[in-house]
Amino acid sequence: MTKAKKKRVIKTIAIDADKCNGCRGCEVICSAFHSAPQYGSTNPARSRIRIVRDPLADIYIPVFGGEYTAAECTGRSEYTIDGKKYDACAFCRASCPSRDAFKEPDSDLPLKCDMCVSDPSLKEPMCVQWCLAGALTYIEREEEAEEAETVEELDAGLAALADKHGWQKLVDAVSRISKKQ
Ligand code: SF4
Ligand code: SF4
């Protein structure tokens, strides 16, 4: 049987660290865009992008908030850039128990970059729009997805419905609908 293929959009922000000047405009607008009400406050501690800064060495490296993890990792990487050693966790994207990065300051809830998904959708994520230095570039590309991914999506959709209504109601509804077919 031929596998059904469908397109999916992969969104990427390319980072050119050489162009970053450490202005932190991206942190400010990210926190403002995600505040409630929107643009009601600015607090870089709530941003989903953070700039690792070493002004004396003129090094600024943007890092985007990634996945939440409940456990600290068991191995870490040490970085040396232009002769300066960085903390083993400096460039990590995870929201994890070992540090405060990428966590809501009040609630400790994890903060992950969501590419500024909104309705209506933005032409480009806010941090990209605000980066006047051109260090952040938004790239969209289409990729073919296999049928297996469609099945995963179906599983995720069913699990979400079950969370909301309970499995038994879901099974009853499927059985009811199938009898009408
Ligand atoms: S807005 Fe651009 S130049 Fe400024 S800190 Fe962020 S990535 Fe760097
Ligand atoms: S893409 Fe949006 S959510 Fe992600 S860091 Fe930039 S402003 Fe924040």
Image (cartoon, rainbow, N blue to C red):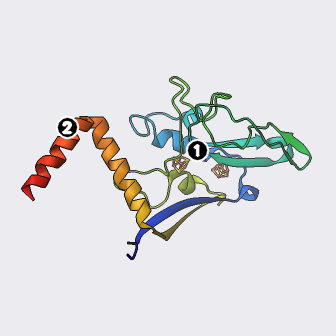
Judged from this view, the residue extending furthest toward the right is 83
**47 lies left or right of 41:** right
Q: Quadrant of residue 122?
A: bottom left
Q: Quadrant of residue 100?
A: top right
Judged from this view, the residue extending furthest toward the left is 180
Q: Quadrant of the C terminus?
A: bottom left
* Amino acid, disc 2: Lys
Q: CA–CA distance between discs 1 and 2?
A: 35 Å
Q: Is residue 107 above or below residue 37?
A: above
* Residue 66 disc label: 1
Q: Nearer the viewer, mark 1 or mark 2?
A: 2
Circle count: 2
Q: Quadrant of the N terminus?
A: bottom left
From the top left corner, tell me how far across and down residue 85 is, in percent.
87, 41
Q: Residue at x 21, y 43 (%)?
A: 171
From the top left corner, tell me how far across and down residue 158 is, in percent.
31, 47
Q: Residue at x 46, y 65 (%)?
A: 9
**126 lies left or right of 73:** left
How many C-alpha atoms fall within 10 Å of the one at disc 2: few (<14), some, or many (≥20)?
few
From the top left corner, tell me how far across and down residue 82 is, in percent.
89, 50
Q: Residue at x 37, y 48 (%)?
A: 156
User: Which residue is tagged 2?
Assistant: 169
**123 lies left or right of 166:** right
Question: Camera-side residue: 5 or 133?
Answer: 5
Q: Secondary structure at mark 1?
A: loop
Disc 1 or 2, which lies upstream in sequence? 1
* Amino acid, disc 1: Gly
